[in-house]
Structures are given as C-alpha cells and as structure tokens.
Amino acid sequence: MEKRFDPKTLAPEIFDAQIKLGMAVKTCGLDLALIELAQVRASQINGCAYCLILHLANARKAGVSQRKLDLLAAWRDTPDFDARERAAIAWSETLTHISHGGVPDEAYKAVRAAFNETEIAQLSFAIGLINAWNRVMVAAQVPPP
C-alpha cells in the first residue's frame, strides 16, 4: 500500500484540532479502557490498520487484557466482557454502522442501561472521533506506525 497523501502536512490545523479533541476525550472522566475498546472495535470494522496499531497499544496501557483484545471481534460469543464493556462495544458498532438504519431506540436503551447521559455523550464523541480518524487514514492510505 502506497501512501496517497499526508493529512498532517496538508491540513495541519484540522489535524491538530483532531488531536486536541482526542485529548479532551481521554480526559473527560470516562474509563479509558472503555474508550479504547470502543475505538478499537470501530477501527476493526473500518479496517484502519493505522488506528488499530495505536489504539491496541493504548488499550493495553489502559489495562485491557490481551485476551479481551483477542476476542473483541467476537465479543458477543464470550463471557469475558462485563455489562459496561458490552454496552460500549455495541454502541460503537451502532454508531460506526449508522448508515445501516440510524440509531434504533433499542440501541439507545441498551447503552442507557449501562451509562448515564453524560457518559453516553462522552462515549459518542470518542466513537465519532475514531470514525473520523479511520476515514481520513484509510482514504490517505497511511501505513501503520
């Protein structure tokens, strides 16, 4: 894969703004392990190798076990994830696949059972951010670091 363009060089103000948003997400108070699980799952769905490398490392630093990371793509088929992790991963899948029918009330009810409204907003920003990064890095064909 050959890199098509360099988003950081060609749009530095936007790139830096995304970095700042990422820092705000990481320091919002929501459990960093949950954020990383949601972001890794979105990156898996979107096929972003660059973001997978970064967020798998971040997830490990946040205390997510290697076993959970190994099983993340099949999270529904294993008891390894707790209720909040399951809700965050499901919400990530729903928002990442938003073009497949929006966000059904059932999906919101499920995430609302595990998170308060503030946490849902924070998680939604984390998922929206990783989806934006995924799309830019995949479009640019930026290779993993």
Image: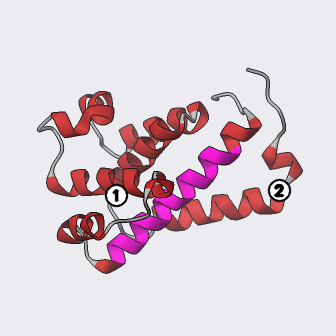
108 and 8: which is toward the camera = 108
* Residue at the right extreme of this rendering: 10
Classify 10 Å Cα crowding around label 1: few (below 14), some (14-19), many (20 and above): many
Identify the residue at image location x=72%, y=33%.
142
User: Can you say whether 88 is above or below 104 in the image?
Assistant: above
The residue that mark 2 highlights is 12
Which quarter of the picture shows residue 50? top right
Q: Main SS type for the magenta part?
A: helix
Which quarter of the picture shows residue 49? top right
* Residue at the left extreme of this rendering: 79
Identify the residue at image location x=80%, y=46%.
7
Please give left or right for residue 62 compared with residue 71 in the image: right
Residue 91 image label:
1
Image quarter where the C terminus lies is top right
What is the magenta range?
118-136
Identify the residue at image location x=49%, y=66%.
125
57 and 45: which is toward the camera = 45
Residue 67 position, x and y percent, is 24, 29
Q: Is residue 77 magenta?
A: no
Identify the residue at image location x=81%, y=62%.
13
Please give left or right for residue 41 compared with residue 43 in the image: left
